[in-house]
Image (tube, rainbow, N blue to C red):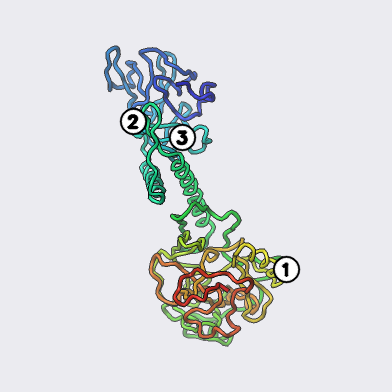
Amino acid sequence: MQAPARWRAGEESAPLQLYNSYIVNCNPPKFGPIDKKSEIFLEEGFASVSSQSPWLHSKYKSVDSTWLTADTSRSCKKKKVKGFYITAVKSMSTFRSGNLKSYEVEYLCDYKVEEGTEYFLVKWKGWPESSNTWVALKNLKCPLLLQYFHSDKNEYLSRLKRGKAVILKNHMKALNPVVAQYIVKKAKQRIALQRWKEELNRKKNHKGMILVENTVDLEGPPLDFYYINEYKPAPGINVMNGITTGCECSDCPAEKCCPEEAGFFLAYNKQKQLKIQPGLPIYECNSYCRCGPECPNRIVQKGTPYSLCIFRTNNGRGWGVKTLQKIKTKRFVMEYVGEVITSEEAERRGQLYDNQGNTYLFDLDYDSDEYTVDAAQYGNVSHFVNHSCDPNLQVFNVFIDNLDLRLPRIALFSTRTIKAGEELTFDYQMKGSLDVTSDSDAVSPTRKRIRTVCKCGAVCCRGYLN
């Protein structure tokens, strides 16, 4: 079997690959049998050569020579044998070539059985698909990738309830090409989602972790979404004005604090649970206050304390968010953030979003209707929270470092105990089960435009999101 052209040209950085009795990884590069006493084979992941060099130990015997294999303790070191340099290579998911560069298995693409030996087609990390090579199962030490391969194969076949192996010439058995294509797409998706998860966790500034999961389809990360932790104001909009002083409290719950200065009650009890009714604003201590970070009136500003998972829903609602931890009732869960734009700009964008079937515009009309939060392109985990007519989250307006009533922060609190693994939802019309002021202007619904069919599945479903 002839070696690939690029390796015949002498590239030392190519992944190690042995073709029967062909040497691929040597210096100077040479392809084809060396001689009967210097042939190199890939035997259980180690380069084997017939030589009496002290760095080799005896392993195999044949009629006309004694076969020796590289000592594992000295693997990945060059040794000269009859004028050629060879490299011993460990049998792992990472192989090393003559220049000691690592070659890692990125994912497995295909499977076949030839003459009783199982082979997997390997995609090497950092190499194009044209460099994919078949590797015997016994030389693969990547159990997780093998698990993914079989899991993806079984998942696809269980959906089709068919998919027998294809019998090729020379008694070689292989996967149906359609199944192999699906496995590759799933592997690429898994890598993309893992990278996205890592990106989200690098950018977040809160305690809880963010996981990403898609066991439903082949959808990857959103292409035009950027994670932010706080409002991104449009030019000309200042979301950090209105604060010049803070409270002088040393024990905020026991003394006159920021909420009382604004004419309202403290929003939280000593257990950090919400104790005010929907429709009432939350005034937290700000950066000018004397109290420290452990002040019980600093909840929303610390970010979500829970680990959450962005997951793909199985009923056509796109992405959703579920909690990975139990959340008690009346606890802060997350903040709704995005671009802060004018209502005029929101009207313009709304026409485009209507055509796409998206609902990301949230009017900030606690006091007036001048500004809107648009979480379509910039946002946090709340971007992926779905609507429900019977939600487990409730919206509250929050004021911290900005007392401008036109620009409240939007916080989502639990309306009941939420079990680990349960999806998080809020009512896009702000008429949750605890909303006793649903007809009030104090809590604003998302901007109403073309009616969108609701798929929440609740017993009390109204049929439309807006």
Depth check, front residue: 32 or 299: 32
Q: Residue 181: x and y, percent?
A: 47, 42
Of marks 3 and 2, the one in the foreground = 2
Q: Tell me where residue 207 appears, x and y as whole percent.
A: 46, 63
Q: Residues within 10 Å of mark 1 (few under 14, many from 20)?
A: few
Q: Is residue 261 left or right of residue 206?
A: right
Looking at numbered disc 1 in the image, what kind of residue is underneath it?
Gly
Instruction: Find disc 3 in the rendering and name its residue.
Output: 103
Q: Amino acid at mark 2?
A: Thr
Q: Residue at x 47, y 53 (%)?
A: 217
Q: Is residue 329 left or right of residue 352?
A: left
Q: Quick one: label 2, few (<14), some, or many (20+) residues within 10 Å?
A: few
Asked whether residue 295 appears in the rendered view, the answer is no
Give the structural element (helix, strand or loop) at label 3. strand
Q: Is residue 391 placed above or below 217 in the rendered structure?
A: below
The one of 111 and 427 positioned closer to us in this rendering: 111
> In the depicted view, which residue is nearer to us: 424 or 324?
424
Task: Using residue 257 as the reference point, say whether residue 73 is left or right of it.
Answer: left
- Which badge, 3 or 2, comes first in the chain's sequence? 3
Q: Is residue 444 above or below residue 7?
A: below
Among all residues in the image, which is located at the extreme bottom? 263
- For mark 1, give the secondary structure: loop
Tag 3 near tag 2, CB within 8 Å: no
Residue 117 badge: 2
What residue is disc 1 on? 236
Q: At x 58% / y 63%, what residue is drawn?
A: 379
Placement of the C terminus among the 4 image quadrants: bottom right
In which quadrant of the rendered view does residue 443 lie? bottom right
